[in-house]
Image (cartoon, rainbow, N blue to C red):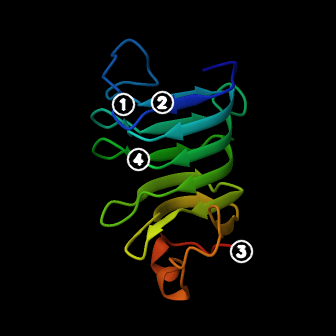
Amino acid sequence: NGGLVNGIYNDSTGTITGTANGTDYLTSPGGIGLQNNAGVITEITNMGTISGGAYGNGILNSGFWGSGTITTLTNFGTITAGTGGYGIDNSNSGVIVTFNNAQGGTSPVTYTGALPGTYNIIVLSPTSYGKLAATTVTGAMNVGIFGATSTGYYSAATTPSTLSGGTTYAS
């Protein structure tokens, strides 16, 4: 994407998968599930799977030709990468304003690059809630609970293990 996209919705039975291209240096040798270069995507809602091919990222939000911006990314499904890639690579001046995430358990979203402005944990149950495994990140982020209401699922005991990585997170 190099322009403006108002919304992308991936249904629970949907899959977006990157495949090796070989003719495009950005996607060789592996595919990228969803790529945003210097464009603006106002909303992505993933209820299915976004995955990178071999050595590819699930989502590459990059500013190779300017600042790639995703205003709101909401993940109720799965965002994964191929070997050596990241679920989300938000590098080279990429901007993610708000990231709402339910993916966790033993397969948290792997993330590199500039941290989102706000990371909201989606709590589905006491044992099912969003986790973020961040590596080589920059910036600071606010952390919140998505749609926080009196569901009874959130407790202080679930918060520390939702974020991992070698950085200090602002709240």
Compared across the picture, whether 141 is left or right of 18 comes to right
- Give the quadrant of residue 140: bottom right
Tell me residue 45's x, y (percent).
54, 39
Q: Residue at x 33, y 16 (%)?
A: 22
Q: Which is nearer the eye, 40 or 25?
A: 40
Badge 2 vs badge 1, beta-carbon distance below 8 Å: no
Q: Which is nearer the eye, 68 or 153?
A: 153
Amino acid beneath label 4: Gly
Q: CA distance from mark 2 to mark 1?
A: 13 Å
Write down the residue under mark 2: 34
Q: CA distance from mark 3 to mark 1?
A: 34 Å
- Secondary element at image label 2: strand
Write down the residue under mark 1: 14
Tell me residue 35's x, y (percent).
52, 29
Q: Residue at x 43, y 33 (%)?
A: 11
Q: Residue at x 43, y 55 (%)?
A: 109
Compared across the picture, whether 146 is left or right of 161 comes to right
- Residue 171's disc is 3
- Between marks 2 and 1 in the image, the one whose residue lies nearer the viewer: 1
Badge 4 vs badge 1, beta-carbon distance below 8 Å: no
Q: CA distance from mark 4 to mark 1?
A: 10 Å
Write down the residue under mark 4: 77
| Mark 4 nearby-residue class (10 Å; few <14, some 14–19, many ≥20) | many
Q: Earlier in the sequence, mark 2 or mark 1?
A: 1
| Mark 2 nearby-residue class (10 Å; few <14, some 14–19, many ≥20) | some
Amino acid beneath label 2: Leu
Q: Earlier in the sequence, mark 2 or mark 4?
A: 2
Amino acid beneath label 1: Gly
Does residue 21 sit above or below 15 in this rendering? above
- Give the quadrant of residue 116: bottom right
